[in-house]
Image (tube, rainbow, N blue to C red):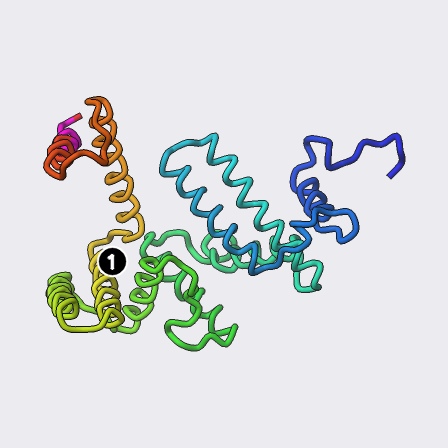
Amino acid sequence: MPDNEPDPVLKPGGGVARLLEIMRRLRDPESGCPWDIEQDFASIAPYTIEEAYEVADAIERRDWGDLESELGDLLLQVVYHARMGEEQGLFDFHSIAEGIAEKMVARHPHVFGSESREKSAAQQTRDWEAIKAAERAGRAQKGVLAGVAKNLPALTRAEKLQKRAARVGFDWDDPKAVLAKLAEESAELVEAREKLTQDQVEEEMGDLLFVMANLARHLGVDPEQALRRTNAKFERRFNAVEENLQASGKPIEEATLAEMDALWNAERARDKLPE
């Protein structure tokens, strides 16, 4: 670039083009960042997953300023993978964008095609799943369970596997049957704890969690979201217990279980008060 022209990566307002150039420069084998140059798809993947969770966390906290920032971090992950793909001649940012654009058009014939928009959300969901199934068949993913990502959170993947199986009739038709199975698996876990090896206990625990995910599906509950809410609730209540103990001059390490239970129950009662 001519000496009198500013470096485009230092000039605000460049949008996606600026970001793509920044990544190209970071990955430049001669002048880039040593850390960025060393990375590959596998080493970056954990950061991609982490950034997606941070987006979800910002939404849950309704922190819209943070959401904007986290979405930028997530976009950087896409740009990172796109750059590595371009370097290897696999794909680039443009082909990624074109691919998802084509997919969205194909999956919404009631918006971009000749199909009528006069159908329920439930029917649209069924149509969406049918189109996705056809796409999987086109990619030689023939099995009912094919294509459920193995790196999804375990509860989420359990729910998705169960949904796939349910489409071909492999499912309970009543939540009561799931509750009965839950009781059965709980009893087996107790037996496993008393009689079996630690590996067998782990297997029985997995069976129990799988049934819990199934019960959540039958009740129309997202098990991952439900557990996140409970985690947040536990964290909030435990922090309150700790703060109350500190206010009374007692470190939590010195408190008795009875003292902590009393403070915990007080927080539970406060949560149940009408707003």
Residue identifier under label 1: 217
Residue at image position (49%, 46%) is 51
Percent of width and height locating residue 79: 62, 49
Residue at image position (25%, 58%) is 217
Percent of width and height locating residue 144: 37, 74
Whether residue 138 sits left or right of residue 227 in the image: it is right
User: Foreground residue, 15 or 252?
Assistant: 252
Residue at image position (73%, 33%) is 10
Disc 1 packing (10 Å; few <14; some 14–19; many ≥20) = some
Assign a secondary structure to mark 1: helix
Residues in magenta, as a range: 267-274
Q: Amino acid at mark 1?
A: Arg
Q: Main secondary structure of the magenta part?
A: helix
Quarter of the C terminus within the rendering: top left
Whether residue 241 sits left or right of residue 142 in the image: it is left
Quarter of the N terminus within the rendering: top right
Vertical position of residue 226 compared to residue 211: above or below: above
Q: How many marks?
A: 1
Residue at image position (64%, 57%) is 95
Percent of width and height locating residue 98: 62, 55
Percent of width and height locating residue 236: 26, 34
User: Foreground residue, 197 or 87?
Assistant: 197
Whether residue 180 sits left or right of residue 223 in the image: it is left
- Image quadrant where residue 166 sits: bottom left
